[in-house]
Image (spheres, helix red, strand yellow):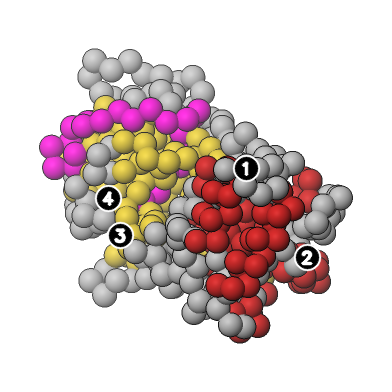
Amino acid sequence: MARSLFIRTNIRTNQIKKLKEQGTIGFLQASLASICLALFLMPQAASAQTELDFNYFKNEVQPIFLAKREGNVRCVQCHNRTSNLRLQPLEDGQMFWTDEQSRSNFESASQLVLPGEDPLMSRFLTHPLSVDAGGDPFHGGGKHFHSQFDPEWQIMADWVAGATERRTPSGTVIRIVQTNAAGDNSTIIDPVTNEVVGQITDIEIPHGVVGSPDGSQIYITNEAMHSLDIVDSRTLRVKRRIHVSGRPNNVSVTSDGRKVYVAIMEMPGAIDVIDVEKMENVKTIATEGAIHNVYVTPDSRYAVGGSVHTSFISVIDTATDELAWTLEMSSGVRPMTFNTNPDGSTKNIFVQLSGFHGFAVVDFDKREEVTRVEHPAVPGEEAHFDGLQGAPAHGLGVSPDGKTLWSTSKVYSHAYIHSLPDLKEIGRVFVGQHPEWVTFTPDGSRAYIGAAGDHVTYSVDTATMKTIARIPVGQVPKRLATVQMAVD
């Protein structure tokens, strides 16, 4: 696979710049000199030997034209009118180009590159690049990339070099992604340092979040646009928006990364199935009521959705994507989590319910509720009932070793920790106003909980059950997830 050299000191560029700066030649002479030098030093038939790949352009380069970069308009806003790079206009509600439109965009962009050549010889690459980084003096759409190390610029340069797929990442890192329910961004936290290391922007009212198993993508449901937004882990830009059948809430992914399930919080109720390879919504599965949360079981055999409206749990067989069974609970179904049998199959569903300060336990094989645990008052802690939205308890998580169950209380601002399988309370920890969601680092050493009322994420040492950091994030942080993220 051909690869571009991003910071190559090029004799052609340097010599011509020197001549211009010395005033030795005029602009026209400089241009002619540049052409002569380029021809003299050009590898024989480089352009003819390097083919531009359409699929790479469609799936990797085109999303850059739709991305919102701070301080810039989207490329598509200007380039669908009078411009050398002419992009096909998107109709109202259209989230991505059709294959036919993509082909037209490909042909237009191809006219502005020299395939296989030094990237600084292609106007497609130099026009949006900062002058200090080797770009053109002026671009009517502004400068979008301030370095040749910018991951989006590198994606485009790799296409010009003949790439057919993304370069192999140098590795992956563990991150906590905190969605901010009253904002247009999601915050990325490094669990080693408990510091904010990035932001995912341009997703208004982000709801659920989950990462792909290979670390290449992050999936966030977009309530404002009724879409599943696929975020490139290396650029942190939305690379595709997939329209879903209604207002989306939580989201989950199979262990092989092939399918994403999206909860649809509209009656009569549904769970949408997204084919990751095709980047298409391939099926809408009818459920018993509007679905607030959906989770893929630890063995990936089932997707389990819960309805606040009808109080039903709907269980879907992921092999057939058909409804397998349902169970009606006593009130609306809120967050859920699972523990497993020794063979990895699902043993119990732990369920928080509307109006209940605690959780219920559903035996997965028996398909029935077997017990409930109610959280007691916390001595000395004032009870809060404002803004509960019908959910006094709204956050559940089983630790990675399967030995503890964590349940958050919005009434008493604490997480209650229970041992498994006996469900004995073994500790409590204060986690701020309106704690909403729980996730763990893969080694189980830390738990992270979004405190919606304090606009912070709590980091808790699971061994000592003590808070070790309060991390400022965005507005009303609720859902969060532990993800792998690929890095260049």
CB under 8 Å between discs 4 and 3: no
Q: Is residue 282 above or below residue 395?
A: below
Image location of residue 222, percent across then percent down:
62, 46
Q: Which mark is residue 339?
A: 3
Q: Residue sitting at 42 percent across and 41 percent down? A: 198
Quadrant location of the C terminus? Answer: bottom left
CB under 8 Å between discs 3 and 2: no
Q: Which mark is residue 23?
A: 1
Residue 435 seen in the figure: no
Q: Quadrant of residue 124?
A: bottom right
**How would you rate the neighbour count of disc 3 (Cα within 10 Å): few for under 14, some for 14-19, many for 20 or more?**
many
Q: Which residue is mark 4?
A: 441
**How would you rate the neighbour count of disc 2 (Cα within 10 Å): few for under 14, some for 14-19, many for 20 or more?**
some
CB under 8 Å between discs 1 and 3: no
Query: Closer to the observer: label 4 or label 2?
Result: 2
How far apart in space, not on screen, are marks 1 and 2 (Cα)? 35 Å
Q: Residue sitting at 80 percent across and 68 percent down? A: 104
**Circle 4: residue type:** Thr
Query: Closer to the observer: label 4 or label 3?
Result: 4
Q: Is residue 299 magenta?
A: no
Pick the front one: 38 or 178: 38
Image location of residue 92, percent across then percent down:
84, 50
Q: Which residue is mark 2?
A: 108
For mark 3, give the secondary structure: strand
